[in-house]
Image: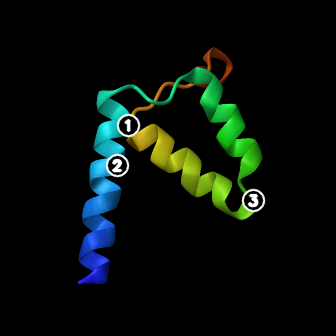
Amino acid sequence: LLPLYLIIGSISGILMAKIVRLFNEDDYETIMDALPKELRLFAKYLWLKLDFPLPSSKKDA
């Protein structure tokens, strides 16, 4: 049951982050700087797919 709990918890956490607008444009750079290089591409993919706000300099790229 643990994998099920992890999946449900992750989905509900992401939904709540979108509903309460937890992330803003400045958080993108902070999160990317905090992650190891190996995870940055995956994090960028998730950030774009979840439609979190991008900084204006990243919207054009």
Disc 1: which residue: 17
Q: CA distance from mark 2 to mark 3?
A: 22 Å
Please give the label number shown on residue 31: none
Please give the label number shown on residue 13: 2
The secondary structure type at the circle numbered 1 is helix
Q: Work out which residue is located at the far bottom of the displayed protein and give it.
A: 1
Residue positioned 71% across, 54% down in the render? 35
Is residue 38 at all visible to an observer of this figure? yes
Tell me residue 20's x, y (percent). 34, 27
The secondary structure type at the circle numbered 3 is loop
Disc 3: which residue: 36
Is residue 61 at all visible to an observer of this figure? no
Q: Badge 1, how many Cα within 10 Å: few under 14, some, many 20+? A: few
Tell me residue 26's x, y (percent). 64, 24
Which residue type carries mark 2?
Answer: Gly
Mark positioned earlier in the residue sequence (2 or 3): 2
Callout in the foreground (3, 1): 1
Describe residue 49's horizontal placement relative to residue 19 as left or right. right
Residue positioned 38% across, 40% down in the render? 50
Tell me residue 23's x, y (percent). 50, 30
